[in-house]
Amino acid sequence: MSLAVLHSRALAGMDAPEVTVEVHLSGGLPSFTIVGLAEAEVKEARDRVRAALLNAHFEFPARRLTVNLAPADLPKESGRFDLPIALGILAASGQLPANALHEYEFAGELSLTGDLRPIRGALAMAYSAQRCGRTFVLPQTSAAEASLVREARILPAKTLLEVCAHLARRESLQAYIAPPTAAPQHDYPDLADVKGQAHAKRALEIAAAGGHSLLMAGPPGTGKSMLAARFPGILPPMSDTEALEAAALQSLGSGGFRLEQYRRRPFRSPHHSASSVALVGGGSNPRPGEISLAHHGVLFLDELPEFERRVLETLRGPLESGYVQISRAARQAEFPARFQLLAAMNPCPCGYLGHFNARCRCTPDQVARYRGRISGPLMDRIDIHLEVAAVPQEDLLRQQAGEASVMVRARVAGAHALQIGRQGKCNSRLGTREIDRWCRPEPAAEGLLRQAIARLGLSARAYHRVLKLARTIADLARSELIAVAHVAEAIQYRKLDRAG
């Protein structure tokens, strides 16, 4: 047979579209050509595949060899096509039976010795292969990640020879059986380590229960970063869908996915020198940025005003929509970005405005200019504005530990379950019509909210966010009605909206 056809997968955003690998041998001067919009790393497969076949004691055909990766208009990148190309050459040259190739999908990078190296995006490819009803053959080091798709049939292999022996029916590859998943035991820093700051801890609990974004403003050393590091430890547990989506996105990133992080809420904390591409994602072959890698987790931006303004403005769309659309001249990609924004900033350039034990020397113009680095539209999209004051000395010297994270997490999980059972989503994701249905305050509370709108000059977006915050506070109190106390507490978390 001079023609062999195999199946593999490319990566396009979160999707793994099918790629048909066609290998044809013909007469003429020996050559090796790869066509089908292949990038440099795919074209370099010629040398890797040739060396791997020779070192595995196969014959490399001295004929005109053409490899077509179809569809031709879909960009192909990375070394995952090494394995199907090598198998296609062996099948086309008659060194391997080709009758069973249509039952499998193959992906794997070859070393010069014929060993299989791990691939990026194994989880997304296994999910797509399972939907097509094919068995997925891939490197053994990527099998654990792919096995998170429970319905997929995974055949892991260490070397090219093992795959060839399986296809020749000399020695079968054993299907990968994922170990039983126990309840995840993730070690988070405990909220009890933070002394004082009862008001801040209460705000964190509300943000965790309703999925709300939060901005902490306060002098240095008041515990803003310490509180942020403990925030993932009080978030509700991840559902199966959330865990799978988060793992798939992390497998597409440059850092890859680690199995021990499965079901652990992502916590991303980029430096303030990060570019907009690093934050949102992009590149010639679009990859997810920090906001997508924080999907179903937390994006913590410390020293918020130190980020470039144009970088911060890229957050406005994803905060509302929950996804990011990356458009380039050659291709487009869409990544989910349903993250919780957690940010921290100083109250002024020197940091000590309002500190009871230090004097601030910043002028009002300097303070206004510093806070003006964060645009009004972005500030309007942040649900909770929290002032974190310096901790009094008596609280620092107190030996009694505060409330542990496990106790707060139990209340958060209960409120979260209440929201899922009532409306199918957390309160922060409610639309306008859903707000009218589920966030209707009692008459006295509505009157208080009207006064707040007039006195604070709240926008329509801020008005809706106050209602959603009040709904979360009522859920934590196990109250069906949104009372005056719930609205009053929600209003105080919009302090940066106050005139002056």
Image (cartoon, helix red, strand yellow):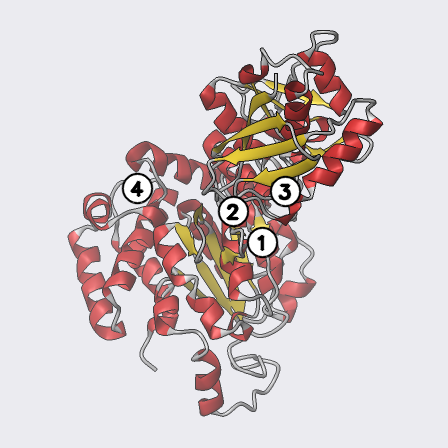
Q: Among all residues in the image, which is located at the extreme top? A: 170
Q: From the viewer's perspective, is 10 left or right of 321?
A: right
- Amino acid type assigned to the residue bearing label 3 in the image: Val
Residue at the spot of label 4: 479
Q: Are marks 2 and 1 in contact (CB under 8 Å)?
A: yes
* Disc assigned to residue 42: 3
> Element type at marker 4?
loop
Q: Residue at x 48, y 60 (%)?
A: 199
Q: Nearer the viewer, mark 3 or mark 4?
A: 3
Between the residue at mark 1 and the residue at mark 3, the CA separation in whole angstroms equals 31 Å
Residue 387 visible in the snapshot = no
Q: Residue at x 55, y 74 (%)?
A: 306
| Position above or below: 356 against 108 | below
> Element type at marker 2?
loop
- Amino acid type assigned to the residue bearing label 2 in the image: Gly
Q: Position of residue 70 (x, y in %)?
A: 49, 34
Q: Would you identify the image quadrant in which residue 155 lies?
A: top right
Q: Would you identify the image quadrant in which residue 5 lies?
A: top right
**Which badge, 2 or 1, comes first in the chain's sequence?**
1
- Amino acid type assigned to the residue bearing label 1 in the image: Arg
**Which badge, 1 or 4, comes first in the chain's sequence?**
1
Residue 365 visible in the snapshot = yes
- Amino acid type assigned to the residue bearing label 4 in the image: Ser
145 or 372, which lies in front?
145
**Which badge, 1 or 3, comes first in the chain's sequence?**
3
Instruction: Give the quarter of the figure containing the C terminus.
Output: bottom left
64 or 181, which lies in front?
64
Q: Nearer the viewer, mark 1 or mark 4?
A: 1
